[in-house]
Image (cartoon, rainbow, N blue to C red):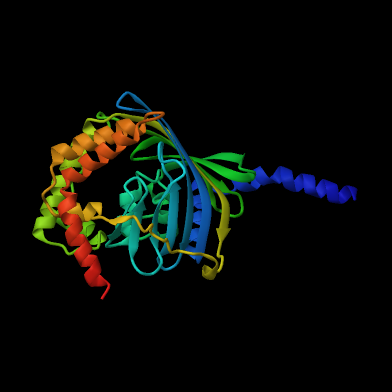
Amino acid sequence: MRKILLLIIMMAMSLPAMAQEMTAQEIVQKAKEKYQSMKSYSSKVRSISEGAISGRPFKDSRKAEVIMARPNLYKITWSNVKPYQGKEDVVWNSGEGAYMYSSMTNGYSKYNSDVMIFGAATGISSNATLTMPSIFYALPEMPSFFDSLKKLEYLGVENVAGKDCYKLKGKTLYSSEHYIWIEVGQFLLIKNQYVHDVDSSMAEKVEMSDEQYAESVRAMGVEVTDEKIAFMKKMSDFGQEMTENVEIDLQRKEIFTNIKVDESVENYNFDFKVPASAKLETNYFDAMFSGDIDLDKLQESQEALMEMMGKEDFDPKETQKIMKDLEDSMNVDSKNEKNKEHMQDDAY
């Protein structure tokens, strides 16, 4: 009995030493291989963001649930902000195309590709449609989140959510301090935490070739034309200008719990029942490629939306007005009728 007890103690003491035998890069590579070998994955996610955007206090806390299976089945739901708490937004693909539902507008829309919808929902889902989908699917158009981490360092073993984890530190283009916790032995991402510290002094002009813009258009699942490439350049310049005028200093963290791997696909429901009162809307990217966006109005609406989301509480009427201004900037009302006709044509 004493020998068994000593053996257990020695094994426990050797855990950190065993972990140190691997470099940070080797640990991340093991994690990438683990996710790529999975047939399905599900977890609950808690995300918290706190800090300031252009000097204005910002605080946001969300809960999400991620369910994914190969080749491209998924349903990702996340809780909404005040005053819409208790309602959920969702992106899903049950094998019949990529869709998004917004409880804020009580509207849903169809997207041309999975990459397109993951990107569209990244911000409003607090990265629920980015971090884990990028790791699990690792698509050419949406590389694994792990690949964005540079200058990785191994910091030791810490317990997170009841699990012993390798703690690693790195950097990304948008974060000078990025930490991840990967479960020892299982190589599952348990926690992701970083300081999002982007300001005008860090902003760099991103130069892209026409072919790179064309690849971006293809990733959205639409036909490449000279007009669409030109518009992508226009939107890129618009985004760059917004970045130069915004200072972001936020601490963000995601914690993944209730992780299940390689469950039978039959155990999951990837479909979402759209409320009967929901209206069909034009998705953001289709509206973009129409080419008649009022960029000044779009910028004003986005800035108002960010300011509103940073408040502890706000008026639902204020939200509705901002969302209406956002739609007006993209002439969405006129496009919804065309989109509805297109969707009806697809049904036959």
Check the picture and name the quadrant holding the C terminus.
Answer: bottom left
Residue at 25% x, 33% y is: 303
Does the rendering let one see residue 212?
no
Which residue occupies the foreground of this view, 141 or 307?
Answer: 307
Tell me if residue 174 comes above or below residue 100 in the rendering: above
Q: Residue 170 at x, y = what percent?
A: 44, 40
Q: Residue furthest top?
A: 55
Left or right relative to 64: residue 303: left
Residue at 40% x, 30% y is: 313
Which residue occupies the foreground of this view, 117 or 273?
Answer: 273
Does the rendering let one see residue 235?
yes
Q: Residue 263 at x, y = what percent?
A: 56, 65
Q: Residue 274 at x, y = what percent?
A: 38, 59
Which residue occupies the foreground of this view, 226 or 21?
Answer: 226
Q: Quadrant of residue 142?
A: bottom left
Residue at 34% x, 60% y is: 99
